[in-house]
Image (tube, rainbow, N blue to C red):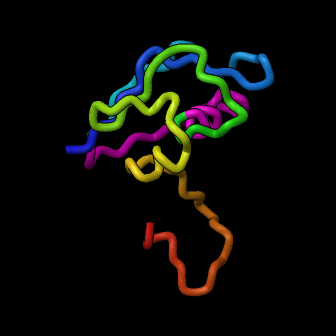
C-alpha cells in the first residue's frame, strides 16, 4: 500500500515562512480534503511536496513509501509517483485528466 508521510515540515519562499511544522499521513485508497482560506498555505504545501524550485524546505521530511523526497528533483518525485495534476489542465487533444 502506498503511504505519503509528511513530518514537521516547514517551508518558505523568498525568505518568508509559509508552512510551519505540518504533519500528516495519507495511505493509498484514502481521500483527504485540504481546506482553508486564501493564503493558508494549501498550494504551497502542494508545491513543496513536488519540489518546486522557488520553495525552500527549512526542516522536516516528505516520504513516499518510506523513501525521503526532500532534496530530490521534481522529476525524481514524479517518477516515484508524487506530482500535481490541475483541475483544469491545458487542453491537449486526445489527453484526458483521467489518463493521470
Residue at image location 43% in from the left, 28% down from the top:
62
Total marks shown come to: 0
Name the spot of residue 94 as percent of width and height, x first: 54, 86
Name the spot of residue 32 as percent of width and height, x first: 40, 40
Residue at image location 57% in from the left, 38% down from the top:
51
Tell me the magenta residue range. Answer: 28-48
> As displayed, is residue 90 above or below residue 47?
below
Q: Nearer the viewer, residue 53 or 96?
A: 53
23 magenta-colored: no
Left or right: 81, with 90 as reference point = left
Name the quadrant of the N terminus. top left
Left or right: 25, with 11 as reference point = left
43 magenta-colored: yes
Name the quadrant of the C terminus. bottom left
> As displayed, is residue 60 above or below residue 24?
above
Residue at image location 63% in from the left, 66% down from the top:
89
Outermost residue toward the bottom in this view:
94
Q: Quadrant of residue 87?
A: bottom right
Name the spot of residue 25 as percent of width and height, x first: 33, 29
> As displayed, is residue 38 above or below residue 14?
below
Q: Main secondary structure of the magenta part?
A: loop
Residue at image location 35% in from the left, 29% down from the top:
5
Q: Nearer the viewer, residue 79 or 89?
A: 79
Name the spot of residue 69 as percent of width and height, x first: 44, 33
Outermost residue toward the left in this view:
1
Left or right: 5, with 8 as reference point = left
Amino acid at each position: 500500500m502506498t503511504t505519503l508521510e509528511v513530518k514537521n515540515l516547514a517551508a518558505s519562499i523568498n525568505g518568508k515562512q509559509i508552512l510551519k511544522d505540518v504533519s500528516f499521513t495519507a495511505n493509498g485508497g484514502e481521500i483527504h480534503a485540504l481546506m482553508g482560506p486564501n493564503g493558508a498555505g494549501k498550494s504551497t504545501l502542494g508545491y513543496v511536496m513536488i519540489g518546486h524550485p522557488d520553495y525552500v524546505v527549512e526542516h522536516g521530511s516528505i516520504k513516499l513509501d518510506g523513501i525521503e523526497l526532500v532534496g530530490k528533483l521534481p522529476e525524481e518525485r514524479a517518477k516515484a509517483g508524487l506530482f500535481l495534476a490541475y483541475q483544469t489542465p491545458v487542453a491537449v487533444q486526445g489527453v484526458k485528466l483521467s489518463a493521470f
